[in-house]
Image: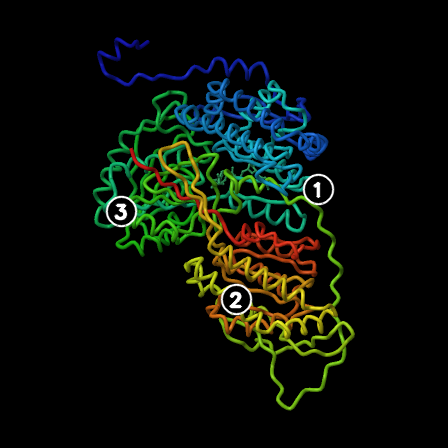
Amino acid sequence: MTDVADIFATLEYGPAPEADGEVRAWLAAKAPFGHVIDGAQAVGDGFKTHNPATGEVLAEVSQGTAADVDAAVKAARRAQPEWAALSGHQRARHLYALARQVQKHARALAVLETLDTGKPIRESRDIDLPLVARHFYYHAGMAQLMAENLPGREAIGVCGQIIPWNFPLLMLAWKVAPALAMGNTVVLKPAEQTPLTALMFAELAQAAGLPKGVLNIVTGDGTTGAALVAHPDVDKIAFTGSTTVGRAIREATAGTGKALTLELGGKSPYIVFDDADIDSAVEGLVDAIWFNGGQVCCAGARLLVHEAIADRFHDKLKARMDGLRMGDPLDKCIDVGSLIAASDCARVAALVEQTEGEVYQAGPVPQTGAFYPPTLITGLHSSDPLMQEEIFGPVLVSTTFRTPVEAVQLANNTRYGLAASLWTENVNLALDLAPKLEAGIIWVNATNLMDAAAGFGGTKESGFGREGGWAGLRAYTKPVGDAKKLPALHIPTGEMAAAGPLDRTPKLYIGGKQARPDGGYVRGVFGPKGACLGEVAEANRKDIRNAVEAAAKASGWSKTSGHLRAQILYYMAENLSARADEFAARLHAQTGQDGTAEVEAALDRLFTCAAWADKYEGRATGVPIRGIALGMPSPVGVIGAFAAEQTPLLAMVSVVGAAMAMGNRLVLAAPETAPLTATDFYQVLDTSDVPGGVINILTGSHAELAPHLAGHMEVDACWSFSSTDISSVIEREAAGNLKRTWVNYGQTHDFAAPQMDRFLEAATEVKTIWVPYGE
Ligand code: NAI
């Protein structure tokens, strides 16, 4: 045996493994593990979980069946009303107790996490566990503040939460803490590879007096997850994992009314400019791509380095790679642990073998266990499969750029949009580029910073919804009050009037111009008593394509200032006001109701939207580093929306106004019973300096248009207030590019109450920009 004196003599590396006896004794005493349902263990047929660094079996856990899921959901349902009825303070005390339990047992939890995942103890002990405790502390505070700070919001109910294997306990904390804080109860399914810390946590929660049924854990593989997604009595699904499974969950929940947040994959750029502090940028990159063996959704996996410094940067990086130490993850001085499974090593190796780039690998690699060496591949083009596909391993791919414009283009050339790191000493450049990068999280001269107070989540195919901060909380609440069922759609019919001598084809409104419908079809518009009021065009799939193209081209709108947008919205109100009588009369003719008050309400709403255009501000979040995280609302992009039949003018301007105010472009399907209100609105848009393509209006059948608008890959969000039952088709089609949806499931929306928070929230996504102060 080597002792310290020998090490001093030879200066050889002396391993310093963390003791695992306590954890192994716990495993031996508790296995085989069951699910935790209603505060009791439920052991079923099992499978084995392994230590990937050695291949040894750690424990036998149960494979959750549909019946187990059902029992857990029932327990959560029974417990929910009482849990939600506790005061915020009482829930805060429970969360505080959980935070304290995590701190008291941090060492055991860290060791167990390392045994189950193969991640270095340095990471589980110094990063995962402190963040887990931080999440429970932070959300204890949120429970305490809920009543005062989230008025009109309440718990969603029973939440099904499905988490991956890369941060098992941290993902549990991210999901469980906000859910419980807001009064929800939970059924959590850990990843099949890494269920153990969730089970230890459940034991600690029980010891801390968490009421039974509030937190239920069902272990098992994807079939258990699918059973949870399919369970009819689950109100919300929160998922973190692969984009493929996220998409399947979007499809499976379509039309069920289940709330959904998805935190999926990424291929985040790591951009280094020639004026960056290069040594810091190299150090940051080690963390960006070799933290947790690159098995991190927000890993800085794509290096974009300024051409002028590329060689020097690569050389320094290689030198740093040579110093990385791989090996026993329990060893406190290990930099890189094992991957999650031997099959993952084979998967990553196969990807690397195919490359035409130049491969550099660090060594030596331990001969047993799922170890894969830190790898750098240089000389790739942006279109190379390895630059595009998530490798989810310790493999960094690299390319060069010459100008900031090119850097942004390369950075955004991906279907993902989770995070981006930006390294430059030029603050102007950093703050100019941060808003241009299509990602939910931007780190300036930093990487992998995360905190309970800062929103985390992506754009594009990295999923939707935010975790952390106030935005994350809203995803675990819903507005108080029951919506009513919409009356069935009734489109009045009647006799077409004879065509006049100057027959005009009714038009759509695309790209700021009136456009003939592609198919040339029209439909009559009739009053409630059958009087013919006019005709409108029947838009088809091609018209949708044209309208979306026009909206996509009008991207300059998203870069305008709130001040400019406000002025245009006020101007729209002025022009609508000038034609108030005409609009009121048209509403009366189409609906039979007096339209005067509705026109007034619509003017009021446009003013409200204009008011918000320059006041829906971000938040500077206090995070526990020397720095701040700026939570900036950014426009969603191109929104497709189906207008409501009730109060058609008010409903339409609410959608148009909110979308425009927040810098989005819109493709709007006019209300089917009052389409002339929408076609009359063309004039208001034309006379109000609204740039072409910002608002596009189509008339026609919602049922026919819905799959095409919701399925279009250039549409970023789809909303429906329609009386036609199109919620399911929208949610299903939205799975293609994982667009955000806001649909009514056949319920009314009370447009008379502005509910601007809901509109503004749906029209934006929080982009979190981390700016460390230095030192
Ligand atoms: P996965 O997405 O299959 O698994 C994540 C979780 O979803 C696990 O708990 C799993 O049991 C569950 N699950 C699987 N199929 C399901 C279904 N049909 N319905 C409901 N739940 C289901 O991820 P996997 O296979 O473990 O990893 C594959 C790839 O996914 C990785 O190589 C990586 O690219 C990506 N990934 C991304 C993560 C992230 O943090 N965004 C985390 C883990 C994986």
Say which element carries label 2: strand
Q: CA distance from mark 3 to mark 2?
A: 37 Å
Kind of residue at disc 3: Asn
Within 10 Å of disc 2 (Cα), the crowding (few <14, some 14-19, many 20+) is many
Is 309 placed above or below 361 here? Answer: below
Looking at the rendering, in which quadrant would you find the N terminus?
top left
Residue position marked by numbered label 1 in the rendering: 232
Question: In this rendering, which labeled residue sits more in front, label 3 or label 1?
Answer: 3
Residue 510 location in percent, x, y? 52, 71
Q: Which one is earlier in the sequence, the residue at label 1 or at label 2?
A: 1
Say which element carries label 1: loop
Say whether marks 3 and 2 touch (CB < 8 Å): no
Among the 4 quarters of the image, the one containing residue 324: top left
Residue 629 location in percent, x, y? 41, 40
Q: Which one is earlier in the sequence, the residue at label 3 or at label 2?
A: 3
Looking at the rendering, in which quadrant would you find the C terminus?
top left
The disc label shown at residue 365, or none: none
Q: CA distance from mark 1 to mark 2?
A: 38 Å
Within 10 Å of disc 3 (Cα), the crowding (few <14, some 14-19, many 20+) is few
Among the 4 quarters of the image, the one containing residue 540: bottom right
Kind of residue at disc 2: Ile
Residue at the spot 42% in from the left edge and 60% down from the top edge? 560
Residue at the spot 30% in from the left edge and 36% down from the top edge? 774
Residue position marked by numbered label 2 in the rendering: 695
Residue 435 location in percent, x, y? 39, 51
Tell me if residue 704 can be seen: no
Residue 183 location in percent, x, y? 63, 34
* Label 1 lies in ligand 1 vicinity (Cβ under 8 Å): no
Please give left or right for residue 27 compared with residue 386 in the image.
right
Residue position marked by numbered label 3 in the rendering: 426
Tell me if residue 330 can be seen: yes
